[in-house]
Image (tube, rainbow, N blue to C red):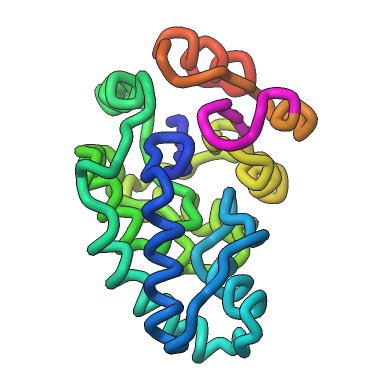
Amino acid sequence: MTLFLFDIDGTLIRVNGRGREAVNSALSSLTDQPISLDGVPFSGRTDPDILRSVLSHNGHDPSADTVESALEAYVTAAREAIQPQHVQLLPGVRTLLRTLSRRDDVHLALVTGNVEPIAYHKLDAAGLAEYFSTGAFGSDHAERDALPPLALRRARRDTGHSFSRDRTIIIGDTDRDVQCAKAAGVRSMAVCTGGANRNALADCNPDVLLTDLTDPSHFQEQVMNVTRYR
């Protein structure tokens, strides 16, 4: 079997700034002070890592306890801020997931920096949650490179299949997605639907580089080039 590990934001959907709004709201409430997000990058990072950076950027102690409290406040704020009308499904995604899910030699899972409740909140809002029964999340580890091995173990547990690393492919829109694939020794597919431009993604040397996910046949052909997937 082939294991596809999908990122969420910028790969499957966009929430068009509502996540940043939720972080601002959560931390402003937690610290009882205005919070600045200026200069703090969000793309490709886990939620705990983002919150730790925002706290530090604003002069607050990013201790484990503080980050845990920030995460709890963020989950509440994000559930309120991100509603179905704010979620943009990216081109071709639903057709691709439907196509892949019908194959009995494929398993779909997640590798995302979102904490698990917000990952599924976003997917529910986009009507995509049914395709992903498992994965690895920002709530599992603050470092993205630690997530793919965990996703592999969970996929093995849920399916009873042992997925080889050359038949595991991470699909994401940032250099961090490519990096975490390389760190785990699995394949990578970069898609130019997030904030990074094509040249920047090409410089990361992903195994596959796609403009978008609008053509399931082309997607599968490219996967065949770098795995034993047939």
Left or right placement of residue 27 versus residue 130 in this view: right
Quadrant of image for the N terminus: top left
Residue 60 x, y percent position in the rendering: 61, 87
70, 209: nearer the viewer: 70
Residue at the spot 58% in from the left edge and 37% down from the top edge: 195
Residue furthest right in the image: 203
Along the line of sight, which residue is nearer the eye, 219 or 15?
A: 15
Q: Which residues are magenta?
A: 188-199
| Residue 198 inside the magenta-drawn segment | yes
Instruction: Give the quarter of the image for residue 25.
Output: bottom left
- Vertically, is 104 above or below 127? above
Residue 40 spot, x, y in % from top left: 64, 61
Vertical arrangement, residue 134 with respect to residue 207, above or below: below
**Image quadrant where residue 76 sits:** bottom left
Q: Position of residue 150 (x, y in %)?
A: 51, 59
Residue 194 or residue 177, whichever sits in front: 194
Q: Looking at the image, which residue is at 64% across and 34% down?
A: 196
- The number of callouts visible is 0
**In the rendering, at what x and y percent does residue 220 appear?**
47, 15
103 versus 165 height, above or below: above
Question: Dividing the picture into quarters, in which one does residue 88 lie?
Answer: top left
Q: Is residue 104 visible?
A: no
Between 169 and 6, which is closer to the camera in this rendering? 6
What residue is shown at x 59% (from left), y 23% (from top)? 227
Q: Residue at x 40, y 35 (%)?
A: 12
**Left or right: 203, with 206 as reference point:** right
Observer able to see residue 116: yes
